[in-house]
Image (cartoon, grey):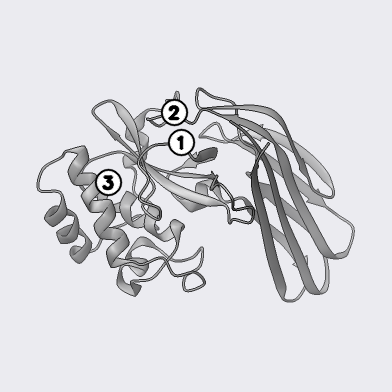
Amino acid sequence: MKLMINHQTHYTYSDQACNSIQYIKMTPMSNVHQQVHYWDVSVPGQKEVKADAFNNIWITSSQRQPYQQMTIMAQGIIEMNPHTQFGIDTAINPNLFLQPTANTLCNAEMKDFAKRHVPYLTREHLINLSAAVLQHIPYVPDQTSVQTSAIDAFQHRQGVCQDHSHVFIAMCKYLGLPARYVSGYLFVPNTSHLASHAWAEVFFENTWYCFDTSNQLFALNSHIYVAIGRDYWDVAPVRGIRERGGIESMNSIVQVLAC
């Protein structure tokens, strides 16, 4: 299945900004699940492309001229295998994804929640845990931010795919299972305007399994990989610093269409 993806991120500033550096992870790679036929990331300024510690494609863009608006556009065509059942293998040791991060820690209540729903390790119990997380944290947009940790989201009891992934990853790490955060896109037929997406993958019985808690999907037949990491901050589409600029406003538009 070929998909055309268009991801635009628009920034506006109340005052002139200058001397900015943007770190961009919006470039998918070809693997056994997907073939990238064409991809381009358009961003003002000078660009440098390299790989990060997780082998994600990492663009550094430097903008020296003053500006009050900036647009980053990623677009391309990807052919996805709709029959993929398991997460992709990488050269990275799965045990790296046992490493705790500030956004994927458990408190006592979360540990009890995980043990209650996973009395012993089976994929079925992990699926039950995913369903329980969604029931505990209904999908409600605009109630959390990229700063929200797993503990915060669990206590707040509202969130989005980022929060579901952080909470599920935190609980799986507590249970002794390597778990990773995946950023990407989700294809939903007959829907053109979607947000970029995130889900968790867990290494169990020598296999990476998909756990898309927000949508209760456990296979990759609708997903496109962009980047893999321990949490959101390892795969953030855009991070950066700048001089001046005042108040920043951001608007993002994503289209995922069959072609």
Q: Name the residue under label 2.
A: 83
Q: In this view, does 91 lie above or below 190?
A: above
Q: Looking at the image, which is closer to me, 128 or 23?
A: 128
Q: Which of marks 2 and 3 is in front?
A: 2
- Residue at 54 percent of width and 24 percent of height: 31
Q: Looking at the image, which is closer to me, 77 or 163?
A: 77
Q: Are marks 3 and 1 in contact (CB under 8 Å)?
A: no
Q: Looking at the image, which is closer to me, 15 or 223?
A: 223
Image quadrant containing the C terminus? top right
In the displayed structure image, the side of residue 20 where residue 96 appears, left or right? left
- Whole-angstrom CA distance, mark 2 to mark 1, is 6 Å
- Whole-angstrom CA distance, mark 3 to mark 1, is 25 Å
Q: What label sits on residue 221 in the rendered view?
A: 1
What amino acid type is highlighted by mark number 2?
His
Q: Residue 216 at x, y = what percent?
A: 35, 50
- Residue at 32 percent of width and 60 percent of height: 134
Q: Residue 231 at x, y = what percent?
A: 44, 50
Secondary structure under the numbered disc 1 in the rendered image: loop
Neighbour tally class for label 2: few under 14, some 14-19, many 20 plus, Cα within 10 Å:
few
Q: Mark 3 points at which residue?
A: 173
Quadrant assignment, res 177: top left
In the displayed structure image, the side of residue 153 where residue 206 appears, left or right? left
Q: Earlier in the sequence, mark 2 or mark 3?
A: 2
